Amino acid sequence: MLKASRIEVVVDVRRWPTSKLKDFKRENMEKWLKEANINYIWMGETLGGYRKEGYENYMNTKTFKQGLKTL
């Protein structure tokens, strides 16, 4: 489906890139996306969810803004 849609890059922003579904764990996604010639980038450290101080507050930080710029 990704190839049919001409997707070239998947950016994963999950803070903890895991899943109950085996195929969607980070290490597995990296593998099958590479096999499909699709780049995988994990940006969970800068854009990922759950923050102790609240995500809305986190969005005002330099780290988050740099993550958006990188994206």
Image: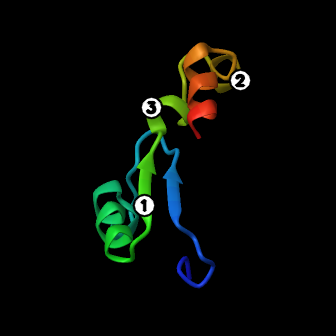
Residue tagged 1: 39
Residue tagged 2: 56
SS type, badge 2:
helix
The amino acid on which the numbered mark 3 sits, given as a three-letter code, is Glu
Earlier in the chain: of badge 3 and badge 2, it is: 3
Seen at 29% across and 67% down, the residue is 31
| Image location (x, y in percent) of residue 28 | 30, 64
Mark 3 burial class by Cα count in 10 Å: few <14, some 14-19, many 20+: some
| Left or right for 60, reference 14 | right
The quadrant in which residue 63 appears is: top right
Mark 2–mark 1 distance (CA, rounded to whole Å): 29 Å
Position of the C terminus, as image quadrant, is top right
Please report contact status of discs 3 and 2: CB closer than 8 Å, yes or no: no
| Image location (x, y in percent) of residue 6 | 60, 76
Position of the N terminus, as image quadrant, is bottom right
| Image location (x, y in percent) of residue 24 | 40, 64
The amino acid on which the numbered mark 1 sits, given as a three-letter code, is Asn
Mark 1–mark 3 distance (CA, rounded to whole Å): 18 Å
Q: In this view, does 3 lie above or below 71?
A: below
- Circle 3 or circle 2, nearest the eye: 3
Q: Is residue 12 above or below residue 51?
A: below
Q: In this view, does 57 lie above or below 16?
A: above
SS type, badge 1:
strand
Front residue of 29 and 8: 8
Front residue of 53 and 35: 35
Earlier in the chain: of badge 1 and badge 3, it is: 1
The amino acid on which the numbered mark 2 sits, given as a three-letter code, is Glu
Seen at 33% across and 61% down, the residue is 30
> Residue 45 — which label?
3
Mark 1 burial class by Cα count in 10 Å: few <14, some 14-19, many 20+: some
